[in-house]
Amino acid sequence: MWEEPVISGDKGSGTIFFSGCALKCVYCQNYEISHGAKGLFIDGGELSFLMLYLQDLGAHNINLVTPSHYAGHIAEVLAKIKGSLLKIPVVYNTSGYEKISALKLLEGLVDIYLPDFKYADNALGQKYSKVPDYTDIAVAAIAEMRRQQPVDIIDNGIMQKGVIVRHLALPSHKEDSKKVLDILSRLDSTLCVSLMCQYFPTPGVSAFPELQKRIRKSDYNDLLEYFQNVGLSRGFSQCPSSATEDYVPDFDLAELSKILSKKSALPIY
C-alpha cells in the first residue's frame, strides 16, 4: 500500500520482490533480501501463479521489485500469460542500473517502468553502490524506458502505462540531488518524478558518518522548490514521517510457502 498513489491506489500493488541486486548500496532498506539473498527458489510456473494470485486478490498491478538480474526469465513468463491470463499492468521496479539489451526483452510486456535515479555523480555510485558507471547506465536506461512508454496513461487515478522516476534524497548530498533533477529535466521535462525523503540509517552505513542521520527537513524543502524551478512539473513528494523502518516489508517466507502450496497446474505449463 506504500507506493506512489497512482501505483497503490486503494487496493494495493501486487508486489513480488526478487532476491539479490545488481547494486550493493550501503544504505539499502531491503538489505535482508538484496544483500542477504533471503527468499525461496521458484520456477516460471510458480512465478506465473503468484502474478495471477495477486491479480485475483484485486491488486491494481503486478509490481516486480529488483528484477534486473532475472529479466530474461521474467520476459519468458510474461510472454506466456500477459493479455491472455494476466490482465492488469506490469510494473518494473528497478534500481535504474539496467542493460539496454535486457530492457528490449521486456518491450511490450512491461506497462510501467519505475526506476530509481540515485546519483548524478558516478563517484557516488562507486562509493555507495559499488559500481563505477551508475549515472551513465541509468540515464541511458531511463531514456530507453521512456522510448518504450512515451505517454503516461492514468485511468481513474491508477497508472496504466508510463514511467515514474524515483530519487531518494540522501543526507549531506543536496547538491547531487539537484543535479539529478537537472538531468531528468533535460532528459524529458514531462517525466513524472517521485522525490523521496524516506531515507533512514541502516547498519550498512556504519563506515559513512555523512549517512548516519536523516535528511534535514529544510534540505528536502529546498529540493522541492528546486524541482519546480528546474522545469519539472509532475511528480510526488513524501512526508518526512516516512523516514522510518515501519514501511519496510516483512519478508515472511512461511506465508509465501503457504501461498505457493495452493498452486494448481496452469494450462500453459
Image (cartoon, rainbow, N blue to C red):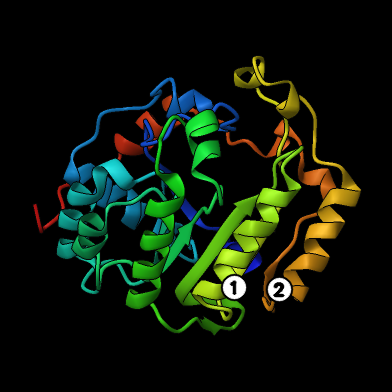
Q: Is residue 197 visible?
A: no
- Relative to 202, say whether 112 is above or below: below
The answer to whether the residue labelled 1 contacts the one labelled 2, judged by CB atoms less than 8 Å apart, is: yes
Q: Position of residue 61 (x, y in %)?
A: 45, 64
- Relative to 43, say whether 168 is above or below: below
- Relative to 80, say whether 159 is above or below: below
* Side of 191 where 176 appears, left or right: right
Residue type at the position of mark 1: Ser
Q: Is residue 130 visible?
A: yes
Crowding at dot 2, Cα within 10 Å, few <14 / some 14-19 / many 20+, comes out as: some
Find residue 75 and report its image quarter: bottom left
Q: Nearer the viewer, residue 159 or 53?
A: 159
Q: Nearer the viewer, residue 185 or 37?
A: 185
Q: Earlier in the sequence, mark 1 or mark 2?
A: 1
* Side of 122 where 177 appears, left or right: right
Find residue 235 and report its image quarter: bottom right
Q: Position of residue 207 (x, y in %)?
A: 64, 15
Crowding at dot 1, Cα within 10 Å, few <14 / some 14-19 / many 20+, comes out as: some
Asked which secondary structure carries label 2, the reply is loop
Which residue does the image show at 37% across and 38% down from the upper left? 18
Asked which secondary structure carries label 1, the reply is helix
Which residue does the image show at 59% across and 32% down from the upper left? 29
Q: Which mark is residue 216?
A: none
Find residue 179 and report its image quarter: bottom right
Q: Position of residue 66 (x, y in %)?
A: 40, 43
Say which residue label 1 marks: 185
Which residue does the image show at 18% across and 50% down from the upper left? 72
Q: Position of residue 114 (x, y in %)?
A: 48, 60
Residue type at the position of mark 2: Val
Q: CA distance from mark 1 to mark 2?
A: 7 Å
- Relative to 19, say whether 81 is above or below: below
Say which residue label 2 marks: 230
